Image (tube, helix red, strand yellow):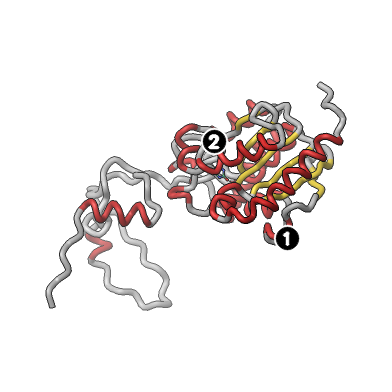
Amino acid sequence: MMPEPRPSARELLAFYLEAGVDCALMDEPVNRLVDAPESVRAAPPQPILSPPVLAQPAATPRAAPVAPPAAALPPDAAIVSAREAARAAPSLQALRELLAAFDGCALKMTATQLVFADGNPQARIMLVGEAPGREEDIEGLPFVGRSGKLLDRMLAAIGLDRSTVYIANVIPWRPPGNRTPTPQETQTCLPFIQRQIELVDPDILVTLGNPSTQTLLSTREGIMKTRGRWIDYDTGSRSIRALPTFHPAYLLRSPSYKRMAWQDLRAIATALGALPPRST
Ligand code: URA
């Protein structure tokens, strides 16, 4: 049989992009097969149930230095440390700085920058999405890509814009290749967004899409059931009303649900209209 022709560099890059690999972690590639220390390559196969044999480090390292594990803390410690850090933040600015200095979530290592929030911290309405995408990662602001443009149009339809709303995400760093954040990453970031909501202290919280709704409102029900239903949300200081609705990225893929999203927007407008003006 004829061997398959080797893929070109362009084909390989296209394959990586399609698989969601769209950023480099290091300047130089590391071939871990070629560069494995002698002791690892020569190790005989181990019986399946025997305790793992740890390879000794080679006397002189042959591989390029590998970055240390991104999240320096073990998983539980990362969540505890996130809770303590978030609780200690007396203001949004302090919270942003604490988050920027927080090393307990590995996503920070692959993201370009922290995507903290956009909009007016005095707003009576706060919207929370899942995690930044590519454009947000580049600009450092939430919802600036395609779905953000749709969100702006949805808000404009009820007379709102970024000067009258506050927008953030559950996860403040872009997951590589826009993959779904892991439960560990979500739990580690959760105390920060909870504190952010408490500090903004909106009257209305809008959760955009399933992940944000399930995480913030502690429900396992899907967005088809939860959307359009007001749910009480305890900020830690008081109880406010939260409304789940579809994520704009979902509406871009499934425009027929825009009709239901419009109902949710009208419910938000009505609720805002029924609220007394915000005292400062
Ligand atoms: N999707 C989100 O959930 N958040 C963003 O900021 C952008 C896209």
Please provide percent x and percent y for residue 195.
Answer: 70, 37
Q: Which mark is residue 278?
A: none
Mark 2 CB lies closer than 8 A to ligand 1: yes
Q: Quadrant of residue 165?
A: top right
| Quadrant location of the N terminus in the rendered image | bottom left
Where's ligand 1: which quadrant? top right
Is the residue 58 above or below the residue 166 in the image? below
Q: Residues within 10 Å of mark 2 (few under 14, many from 20)?
A: many
274 or 118, which is in the foreground?
Answer: 274
Residue 121 is situated, as x and y percent measured from the top left of the image, at 69, 28
Is residue 13 left or right of 181 when viewed as pictured? Answer: left
Q: Residue at x 76, y 32 (%)?
A: 124
Q: 192 or 129: nearer the eye?
A: 129
Q: Is 2 on the left or on the right of 169, as rendered?
A: left
Residue mark closest to the camera, 1 vs 2: 1
In the image, farthest residue toward the left:
2
Could you say whether the residue bearing mark 2 is in a helix, strand or loop? loop
Residue under pointer 1: 225
Q: CA distance from mark 1 to mark 2?
A: 29 Å
- Which quadrant does the C terminus fall into? top right
Residue depicted at x 71% and y 61%? 221
Q: Residues within 10 Å of mark 1 (few under 14, many from 20)?
A: few
Image location (x, y in percent) of residue 66: 33, 46
Labelled disc at residue 115 = 2
Asked which quadrant contains residue 157, the reply is top right
